[in-house]
Image (spheres, helix red, strand yellow):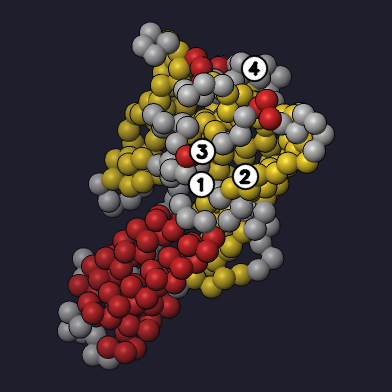
Amino acid sequence: MSRFARITTVARDLAARARLRADSMPRPLFLVALAASAVLLAAAVESLSGIDERTTDVEESSAATVDEFSGTEVDGIELELLEYGFGAIDDPQGGQRISLGAIVRNPTDAEVYIESMRLSGLRPDGEATDHEFFLGRVPPGAEVTVGLVLPLRPELVDMDSLELEIGEVTAFEFDLEPTGEPGYAIRPPPEITMLGMEPTVAPQGHRLNYEITIDGEEDYSSHSVSLLFRNEEGDIVGGIPATDHPFAYAEGAFNSRHFPAGTSVQYVDLPDDEVPEEAELSRTEIGLAS
């Protein structure tokens, strides 16, 4: 690999790490982080550009490299909320929480970040209530599986009245292959395949086995995976993140884990109390989350 290619790979890694941190932030912090990452990226590329003796014009090289990794914000992008549904699962601290399952599709070539999802409904007394939350990245042309435990209790809202909509989004278009140099190729999203379930005793429930294939040069990369629950009729009745702590999102944590490059077999344990009562386990789905 040429020295310039190594420089661009380092710069790309810096940008990717900054984006991962920004994904978990609310919109104001997200924008601050995005601006900061762009400044850091420009500084890193400029400081490294002199290593390659073939690059004689530092100013021109730095500007080109920054442009190659800069996104242009675009307006008028709309995502598709294909399906959604709700269920109730037991809270380890007592009571229950509302579980959300949904499928969102990005039919465009833009990189889209969902700054807010809006949930509205009625309280038992008939008064309106709403809840807004950050979701994250939806890659170009991809579908993401939303599985979340929300900080809402089913006894405080009429679950039949709940409606979900996509709120504010930020979209960027990137030119990632301007020179043909190594390291610019757009990597496909991971492929996830459900392998099956087996009963478990401790905790009492089931273990869901799945296969994930990641195309990349890094030894490990971070991704979020979610489960979607359906009833016997095929309707969505909730979802959860495929982690050991599905309630973490309700407390403000970012649900992701490291996966090795290539194809590997993974699993997630599903205690009975983390599955909505209406769910038919044989219809459980797993997919890449935002």
Q: CA distance from mark 2 to mark 4?
A: 22 Å
Q: CA distance from mark 4 to mark 3?
A: 22 Å
Near mark 4 (Cα within 10 A), the count class, few <14, some 14-19 or many ≥20, is some
Q: Circle 1 sits in a helix, a strand or a loop, which is it?
A: loop
- Residue of label 2: 104
Any mark on residue 250, and which? Answer: 3
Q: Which kind of residue does numbered mark 3 sit on?
A: Ala
Q: Vertical placement of 122 versus 66: above or below? A: above
- Residue of label 1: 290
In percent of the image, x 45 and y 36: which residue is there? 248
Q: Earlier in the sequence, mark 2 or mark 1?
A: 2
Q: CA distance from mark 3 to mark 1?
A: 16 Å
Q: Which kind of residue does numbered mark 1 sit on?
A: Ser
Position in image of residue 107 (x %, y %) = 64, 53
Q: Earlier in the sequence, mark 4 or mark 3?
A: 3
Q: Which one is in front in this view, the residue at disc 4 or the one at disc 3?
A: 3
Q: Which one is in front in this view, the residue at disc 2 or the one at disc 3?
A: 3
Q: Which kind of residue does numbered mark 4 sit on?
A: Glu
Position in image of residue 57 (x %, y %) = 27, 91
- Residue of label 4: 278
